[in-house]
Amino acid sequence: MAACAIRRGLLSTVTKYNRKHTLRILNVEYSGRRELNRLRLPCSACNLFNVQQARYLSSRNRPESKVLETVGVFEAPKQHGKYETGQLFLHSVFGYRGIVLFPWHARLYDRDVTPPSGESKPEPPGTHGSKEVKGKTHTYYQVLIDTRDCPHISQRSQTEAVTFLANHDDSRALYAIPGLDYVSHEDILPYNSTDQIPIQHELFERFLMFNPSKVPPFIPRDTLRAWQEKNHPWLELSDVHRETTENIRVTVIPFYMGMREAQNSHVYWWRYCIRLENMGSEVVQLRERHWRIFSLSGTLETVRGRGVVGREPVLSKEQPAFQYSSHVSLQAPSGHMWGSYRLERPNGTFFDVRIPPFSLESKKDDTPNGFLPGPFSSLA
């Protein structure tokens, strides 16, 4: 499998050298692990090895065996600044190949961090605490996922998570762009490639063009700029909410989708993307969800159910993360959501993990009306 072989890692034999002559780079070990093992390669001054010799490997499925082939050359991750349009990368958690389309600058509200006095996010009414959370700027990226890797990550991360409201009378019809994702800066493991079409996605050549004189050598077409500008309100990532309970970290990103009229009333739609990550070593399984949804109209709804999106994912040290998207609609322009997940330990005991509270805010613009090149899948 492509994703498997990529994360099997840098197949290099590394010997021990004096610490002051080594250069630390990230090694992606294929076991599906979140952790990025540190691999030491001697610096170029020693004339022994060079960082550029470290290559990512991919594979093609063959009935008789797995054939490895070179994908590209590893680059040092950026500790400061942002990645540019056209940057190739491997996802550090899910292992897929992707390419950066453009960045988003979000406000991250991390409830695991005790805020000093200053900017904070007040709790919505009725939530599970009174803690105020300081927001800080954090970079995310809109990216394309290589379609060859989608089958290998579909059990851990939805590849049709970015959805839009349809432009017809059916107010509940949703459409998705397959292989479009949002990726945090720290999840990117950059690499470069000499291949002029290194990512297989129907939108790749419509959004990007190869220019060997540029770094990275893939520059945006006017089509990408127009698509970004027209759909900015529905793509924009503004707030990210994060909280950890008993080593299970929950990250929530809400998106406003637009308003539709139904039965002589206005219905406002949002999607929300959630990632659960097991930061510990104990295997756990998600069994139930419990949501509280407060509308500005004054209603408070409780939703309980088994699993999420029809699944009860297992979070282990080898496969620590699960990511999914869902939707909510209100008959008011704003509201709040919060809740919890119930997880089960191997010994049969249960514990609850908090979902950080987040706001549902609408925008004045109308719903997008058309310029969405590429394939769509109806999720209605």
Image: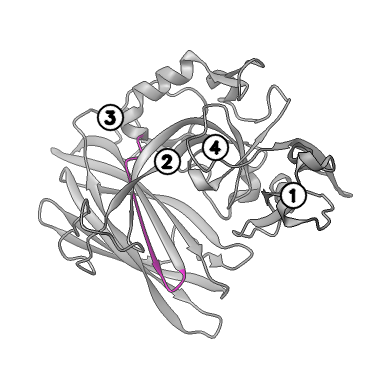
4 or 3: tag closer to the N-terminus: 4
Q: Nearer the viewer, residue 189 or 155?
A: 189
Using the image, determine if residue 284 lies above or below residue 165. Answer: below
- Which of marks 4 and 2 precedes in the sequence? 2
Nearest to N terminus: mark 3 or mark 2: 2
Which structural element holds mark 3? loop
Type of the residue with mark 1: His
* Magenta stretch in the rendered image: 236-247
- Cα–Cα gap, marks 1 and 3: 56 Å
Q: Residue at x 15, y 45 (%)?
A: 332
Q: Earlier in the sequence, mark 2 or mark 1?
A: 1
The local crowd at label 3, few if under 14, some if 14 to 19, many if 20 or more residues have their Cα within 10 Å, is: many
Image mark for residue 139: 2
Alpha-carbon span between mark 2 and mark 1 = 32 Å
| Disc 1 element | helix
Residue mark closest to the camera, 1 vs 3: 1
Identity, as a three-letter code, of the amino acid under mark 3: Thr
Camera sees residue 263: no
- Could you tell me how far apart the alpha carbons at marks 4 and 3 are, in whole angstroms? 22 Å
Using the rendered view, name the quadrant where residue 172 is placed.
top left
Q: Residue at x 21, y 57 (%)?
A: 117
Q: What is the C-alpha distance between the residues marked 4 and 1?
A: 41 Å
Percent of width and height locating residue 212: 67, 16
Picture residue at 60% right of the left edge, 25% below the top:
216
Residue 8 included in the magenta stretch of the image = no
Position of 249 compared to 303: left or right? right
Task: Provide the residue designation for mark 3.
Answer: 367
Q: Amino acid at mark 2?
A: Thr
The residue to which callout 4 is attached is 179
